[in-house]
Image (spheres, rainbow, N blue to C red):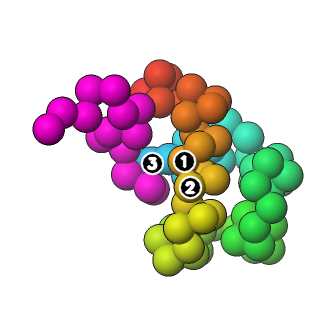
Amino acid sequence: MTQANNPLHGFTLEQIVTALVDHFGWPALANQIDINCFKQDPSVKSSLKFLRKTPWARQKVEDLFVAQKLYQQR
């Protein structure tokens, strides 16, 4: 089964979070997606821990990554 039409194919969650932080910065990212791991003492590591166990939040992060077409810049 091919992943050719999946824009997330080949990206780790860490790469996605890092790209969003590089693009928006933590404060603007927290405005886009209202979750505490982006607002209170944010770090990639703490965000990954939360996102890996919270499917709805991970979906929002992945959707924003795709909506901003950040996958095309890599």
Q: Position of residue 66 (x, y in %)?
A: 55, 34
Is residue 39 rendered to the left or right of residue 15? right
Based on the picture, tell me whether residue 62 belongs to the magenta stretch. Answer: no
Q: Residues within 10 Å of mark 2 (few under 14, many from 20)?
A: few
Spot the residue most to the top: 72
- Which quadrant is home to the N terminus? top left
Residue placed under numbered mark 3 in the picture:
15
- Which quadrant is home to the C terminus? top left
Could you tell me how far apart the alpha carbons at marks 2 and 1 are, in whole angstroms? 5 Å
Residue placed under numbered mark 1 in the picture:
62
Could you tell me how far apart the alpha carbons at marks 3 and 2 are, in whole angstroms? 15 Å
What amino acid is labelled 1 in the image?
Answer: Glu
Residue placed under numbered mark 2 in the picture:
59
Tell me if I can see residue 44 in this picture: no
Q: Position of residue 67 (x, y in %)?
A: 62, 32
Q: Position of residue 57 (x, y in %)?
A: 62, 64
Could you tell me how far apart the alpha carbons at marks 3 and 1 are, in whole angstroms? 11 Å
Magenta segment, prevailing SS (helix, strand or loop): loop
Q: Position of residue 34 (x, y in %)?
A: 80, 61
Who's the residue at 60% across and 65% down the image?
56
Q: Which mark is residue 36?
A: none
Q: Nearer the viewer, residue 49 or 6?
A: 6
What amino acid is labelled 3 in the image?
Answer: Gln
Which region of the structure is painted magenta? 1-14
Who's the residue at 60% across and 52% down the image?
61
What amino acid is labelled 2 in the image?
Answer: Gln
Query: Are discs 2 and 1 less than 8 Å apart at CB?
Result: yes
Query: Are discs 3 and 1 less than 8 Å apart at CB?
Result: no
Is residue 42 rendered to the left or right of residue 51? right
